[in-house]
Image (spheres, helix red, strand yellow):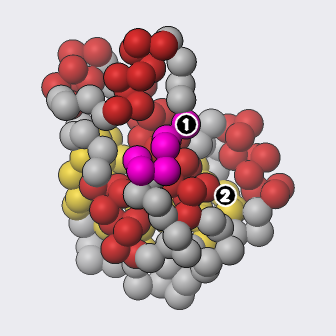
Amino acid sequence: MHMEQLRELLLGFPGVTEEEPFGPEVVVYKVMGKMFALVDYDSVPPTMNLKCDPDRALDLRDVHDAIRPGWHMNKRHWNTLDLDGSLRGPLVAELVRHSYDLVVAALPLRVREKRAPKSRSERLCTRRGSNPQPTASEAGTLSN
């Protein structure tokens, strides 16, 4: 995935801000003030930390060499992705969405409601009572 595509994906969710609280080396993406992604665009390869369900985090680490326990994060709840081209764009997009959704779900309802407008998948979840996967257009038809 190209880094500009990644940045557009991260900023495309409702209520997201881009900050550099730790200095210019790491860009932090927050939803309503809570971190859901940290990206080091300058490292070789670039890396990204994402929040993840603990069981799924372990499964992903077993399957993908480019996914490892979160660097400087709670390793139970965060993964570091090496963006070396071995992870396909749709998988990266889905993991970004998963991280965003986990953080949003933990926000108080009054804070969640301030994130208008809702994303397409959130509207579908409300109507269907499910958690649909992002479509190719929502994922920006991402490629490596």
Q: Magenta stretch containing residue 16, yes or no?
A: no
**Picture coordinates of residue 36, whole percent (x, y):** 41, 47
How far is mark 1 from mark 2, CA to CA? 24 Å
**Picture coordinates of residue 26, whole percent (x, y):** 35, 71
Residue 56's tag is none
Which is closer to the viewer, label 1 or label 2?
1
Element on which disc 2 rests: strand
Q: Residue at x 40, y 66 (%)?
A: 6
Quadrant location, the C terminus: bottom right
**Picture coordinates of residue 73, whole percent (x, y):** 53, 54
Q: Nearer the viewer, residue 114 or 131?
A: 131
* Comes first in the chain, label 1 or label 2: 2
| Residues drawn in magenta | 133-138
Residue 137 shows in this picture: yes
Residue marked by disc 2: 69
Number of on-image labels:
2
Q: Amino acid at mark 2?
A: Pro
Mark 2 surroundings: few (<14), some (14-19) or many (≥20) residues within 10 A: many
Residue 133's tag is 1
Image vertical order of residue 118 relative to residue 84, above or below = above
